[in-house]
Image (cartoon, rainbow, N blue to C red):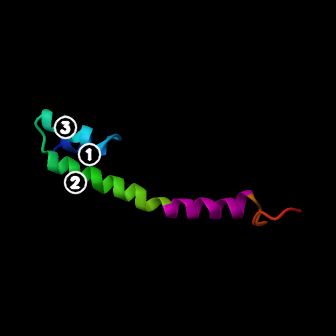
Amino acid sequence: MEPGESMFALLPGGVGEMVATAVSLGFDGAVVTGAHMVRLFTVVLSLPLIFWAAEAIHRRWIAGGRDGQAE
């Protein structure tokens, strides 16, 4: 993957805009689309794990193990 293609694949923004910009600059649009979609799916599919970890951290260290029970 060329540095320009990887830059457009990793930039935040719409897939269509990144592909149109990359193609207009002479890069391969299919490579940019594929890498951009892999990045987006990775972020979206990892969100439940991140929320689970944040909840566990909150319960253990912030709430003091009370699990939201009032004293």
Q: Which residue is mark 3?
A: 20
Q: In the picture, which quadrant includes the C terminus?
A: bottom right
Q: Which residue is mark 2?
A: 34
**In terms of sequence position, does the residue under pointer 1 or pointer 2 come before the other?**
1
Amino acid type assigned to the residue bearing label 3 in the image = Ala
Q: Which residue is mark 1?
A: 9
Circle 2 residues within 10 Å: few <14, some 14–19, many ≥20: few
Q: Can you tell which quarter of the image residue 28 is in? A: top left
Residue 2 shown left or right of residue 67 in the figure: left
Q: Compute the Cα span from label 1 to label 2.
A: 8 Å
Residue 65 shown left or right of residue 29 in the figure: right
In depth, the one of 57 and 67 nearer the eye is 67
Amino acid type assigned to the residue bearing label 1 in the image = Ala
How many numbered discs sit on the rendered protein? 3
Residue 7 can be seen in this image: yes
Circle 3 residues within 10 Å: few <14, some 14–19, many ≥20: some
Task: Look at discs 3 and 2 and give the one toward the viewer.
Answer: 3
Judge whether residue 52 is colored magenta. yes
Q: In the rendered view, would you say 12 is above or below 42?
A: above
Residue 37 shown left or right of residue 59 in the figure: left
Q: Do tag 3 and tag 2 residues touch (Cβ < 8 Å)?
A: no
Q: Over which residues does the magenta segment extend?
A: 48-62
Amino acid type assigned to the residue bearing label 2 in the image = Gly
Q: Position of residue 47 (x, y in %)?
A: 48, 59
In depth, the one of 33 and 4 nearer the eye is 33
Q: Do tag 1 and tag 2 residues touch (Cβ < 8 Å)?
A: yes
Element carrying mark 2:
helix
Q: Compute the Cα span from label 1 to label 3.
A: 12 Å
Going by the picture, which residue comes out furthest to the right?
71
Task: Look at discs 1 and 3 and give the one toward the viewer.
Answer: 3
